[in-house]
Amino acid sequence: MYQEGDAANRTALAAAWLAQHLFGGALLGEHLGQLLGIAWSVTLSVIVLRSRVLPRWLGLLGLIVSVLYLFNQGDILATALPGFPVFDLAGLVGSTGWGLWIAALGVTLLFRPRAKNA
């Protein structure tokens, strides 16, 4: 439709694609998905700190990387809201740190001593 249409048709299709991309892709997909992931990791980190079932450093590190990952939301929101403040390094540091924390969580769970059945 885009290639065969006239200028008005192309403009309308480009606007529809951009709206779908910004709303469905950036705001719902990336922003909401990352916010839910951050909320999950903050919740899990607080549970780790309060229950002491896992090492305390794992809970503290989870909170730190979650906050760093939260700063990356500016990059996503800036695609839909021009001028939104962006902290460029937050994407790299936040997402890499969060991924490494998830890996550390998995390794810790995998190799922790098993509780004896009472």
Image: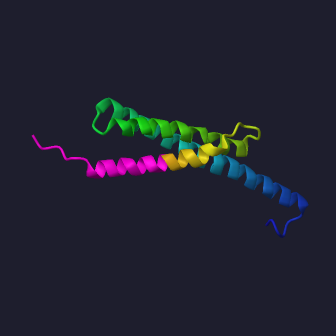
For the N terminus, the quadrant is bottom right
**Residue 31 falls in image quadrant:** top right
Q: Does the magenta stretch include residue 23?
A: no
Report x, y in % for residue 73.
Answer: 62, 41
Q: Given the current orientation, which residue lies at the most extreme left position?
A: 118
Inspect the magenta stretch and tell me whether residue 117 lies in it.
Answer: yes
Residue displayed at 54% across by 48% down: 95
Report the span colored magenta: 98-118
In the displayed structure, 104 sits above or below 45; it is: below
Which x, y percent locates residue 39? 48, 37
x and y, in percent, of residue 109 in the image: 30, 48
Q: Which image quadrant is residue 81 in?
A: top right
Q: Which one is nearer the viewer's eye here, 31 or 42?
A: 42
Q: Which residue is drawn at 71% across and 36% down?
A: 85
Q: Say above or below: 57 vs 110.
A: above
User: In the image, is 37 to the left or to the right of 75?
Assistant: left
